[in-house]
Amino acid sequence: MDTTEFFSRIREGNLESIRKGLEANPELLNAKDPRGATPLIMASYYDHIPVVRFLVEQGARIDEKDGSGNTALMGVCFKGYEEMAKILIEAGADVNARNGMGGTCLIFAVTFNREGIATLLIEHGADTNAVDAQGKTALYHARTQGLQNLVSLLEKNS
């Protein structure tokens, strides 16, 4: 199975085909697609929980970044997949990783109004005072969007 076909199976969430692909070619585990996404990043983005669990068990690099500098956990914070966020954090994902614009998982969660994920990140040590490349904190983003629940959460945990 080549990389293109393997990534097609990842998008589909076809666990059995993914398993066979890795057996035939273990290098696919941390391969990158043309946009720089790894199988773990892509499976997380599509919320394929069984596939993500399998890839993590196989040793996929949890904090590998895509072409934009985003990790799997960052994508999950953007998309709002709370269960997936728990799985990645339990697997050791860095809750304070930064992308090329200085964005963190917490800043993503707040910007996209993902209160449950923001709470989870804070519980696991997310830096509430981290600033992005524009010098803005998660609290700044919550305030400017009028997200009072997140403002309260961040103020309580800063």
Image (tube, rainbow, N blue to C red):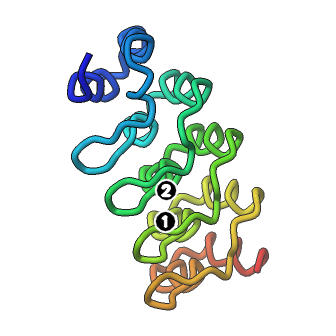
Q: What amino acid type should be assigned to the residue bearing mark 2?
A: Met
Q: Quadrant of residue 142?
A: bottom right
Where residue 16 appears, as percent x and y from the top left, is 41, 8
Measured along the vertical axis of the image, is residue 110 above or below residue 102? above
- Whether 112 is drawn above or below 82: the answer is below
Circles 1 and 2 in contact, beta carbons < 8 Å:
yes
Q: Position of residue 137 (x, y in %)?
A: 57, 83
How many neighbours does mark 2 have within 10 angstroms: few (below 14), some (14-19), or many (20 or more)?
many
Judge whether 71 appears above or below 83 on screen.
below
Query: Which numbered marker is on residue 108?
Result: 1
Q: Which residue is mark 2?
A: 74
Q: Nearer the viewer, mark 1 or mark 2?
A: 2
Camera-side residue of 122 and 59: 59
Residue under the image location 62 percent in, 25 percent down: 57
Q: Residue 144 in the image: state x and y as whole percent.
A: 47, 85
**Among the 4 quarters of the image, the one containing residue 148:** bottom right
Instruction: Please report the residue visible at 41 percent of the width from the left and 28 percent of the height from the top.
Output: 27
Q: Nearer the viewer, residue 51 or 143?
A: 51
Residue at 43% across / 59% down in the picture?
70
